[in-house]
Amino acid sequence: MPVYLLLELILVLVLFALVRVYAPERTLLAGAILGAGATALLAVNYRALLSLEFWVGLIGFVAILSALMVVIHPNPMVSILFLIVNLFCIALFYLILQAQFLAALQIIIYAGAIMVLFVFVVMLLNLKAEVGLRVAAGPQRWGALLLGAAFVALLFNAIRGRLDQAYVEPGMFDPAFGAARGLGGLLFSKYLFAFEAASVLLIAAMIGAVIMAKRQVRR
Amino acid sequence: MDPNLSQLLVESAVKIAIFFFVVMTAVAYMTLVERRVSAWIQDRQGPNRVGPFGLLQPLADGIKFLFKEEITPPHVYRPVYLLAPLLIFVPALVTFSVIPIGPAVELYGRMVRLQIADVDNGVLVILALSAMGVYGVALAGWSSNSKYSLMGGLRSSAQLISYELAMGLSIVGVLMAAGSLRLNDIIERQAEHGWNILWQFPGFLIFLTAAFAETNRLPFDLPEADTELVAGYHTEYSGMRFSMFYMAEYVNMITASALATTLYCGGYHVPGLYRLGLPPLVAALVQVLAFCVKVGFFLFVYVWVRWTLPRFRYDQLMNLGWKVLLPTALVHILWVSFVVLMDWS
């Protein structure tokens, strides 16, 4: 079962992290032993490596882990790197759903252009590890916890009834659906109005940004 | 295991090994070509002592880099500092996997494409990977924690954002003409209707300029401008890690040349070859050779331009990118769409 293999690999990873935190001087030894164990696991269950379920699970795990690291890591630049990893995982999900065109765009636009701007800003402001950005105890923290719990409940409720559809059958989607032609056809026929409205909005936002930047120069 | 799948895996592994070997050898000899050609342009001798005509010089350079001490300065942010050379090197190599270097050939009873992966969205994959290359430069600059490196990284990210736009728009013309994002379709279209460079010359010029900027080559090498920034983003690197930046620059040049060949100069297509009636295997060999010659020409142009033009000033660079190349590319798209609509080509 691919899922059990995945869980075992995650267990190995957690063990390694525990050793690194509680006994840093044994990291190399633990890494060697656990790495050999993981390799043996993969060698015995090599069939699982060919199944879609294993890869979907692995990508999902990396996606969740990187998303957590974006929030947890104190260094803004490292957070950005994990966000890029996360965006890559989402692109891989698009690929699994046969939406190759969307996957490529996801990487070009989000992981490429937008994240480069993030990197640029962090470098320009020369942000070091965050100081005093942690939320102190008070109404804000309680509010955040409450809203977070509500959101988790909402997500759980949405997923609960769908566990039988957790994985996608390989032949479920039409490959032409995710190609550039199919997407372009939909954008310029069925969703033409929404598409044009979005582009007008973007142009308005761009002009607004230019005007605001100019006004500050004059001052 | 499914026999088809295992065959595919073996075939891909062989192809990857061959491509890697060829590209890395080409990189090694590009460094020699660059030094010899620059010497020729400046009326000097260049490295000519190691082996006949200096042909063993790249080997000597490689050995020297391997035995140099790797110094990691104490003030760097270590994880990112170690990651940055890989981030610039790997995407540059991977880009080559979608470029076709020849037609499909029948070998051992199988149709084999002379290309590692025949991707439907080949052009987009290339754009996506070239967008990844900037992280290597920017993060090397940031993690070095030194003012020269930081300036180099900042300049590089601004430069790449500006020129990626012009590059993408110039490629749109090619895509409209071919009606496909697949590189093989683009080459076939050029074989039938004439090379794109003949009627999309402005687009070709924009693409070439943007490619120079994306590979950080002179006249756009502001991220490492030696006269003002020591060595820019790789100031703090030494030994094998430094040479990885250096190799990545050459791999990027080769990939950009291969891309210019594929998109504008017909790829592996040789006009009038089918009239000679050669056996398919020989014809394929001629086509692969033609591809190599075309790429070699573009590589020579890279070296030629480097030793001919002086470096741009930073404001000139930005003006050229945003006020000249971008509007020209948009007008060029209009022209190409007009031609495609009237079906003139």
Image (spheres, rainbow, N blue to C red):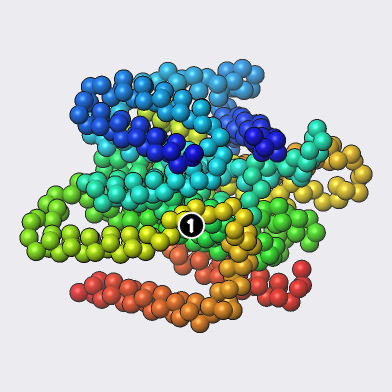
Please count the marks in the image: 1
* B209 relative to A34 in the view: left or right: right
Residue B301 appears anywhere in the view: no
The answer to whether residue B323 is visible is yes
Q: How many neighbours does mark 1 have within 10 angstroms: few (below 14), some (14-19), or many (20 or more)? A: few
Which of the chains bears the disc numbered 1? A
The quadrant in which the N terminus of chain B is found is top right
Q: Nearer the viewer, residue A72 or B44?
A: A72
Q: Residue at x 41, y 53 (%)?
A: A87
Q: Position of residue A89 (x, y in %)?
A: 44, 50
Left or right of residue B3: residue A209? left
In this view, the residue in front, B117 or B165, is: B117
Identify the residue position indicated by label 1 in the image.
A165
Query: Where residue A150 appears, x then y in whole percent?
Result: 24, 64
Q: Residue at the spot x=58%, y=73% of the render? A: A186
Residue placed most toward the observer, B217 or B345:
B345
Percent position of residue B317, x then y: 43, 57
> What SS does tag 1 mark?
helix
| The image quarter in which residue B224 lies | top left
A36 is higher (above) or lower (below) than A18: above
Above-or-below relation of B59 to B89: above
Task: Name the spot of residue A195 as percent of width and height, x first.
Answer: 49, 77
Against B194, is A32 above or below? above
Amino acid tagged 1: Gln
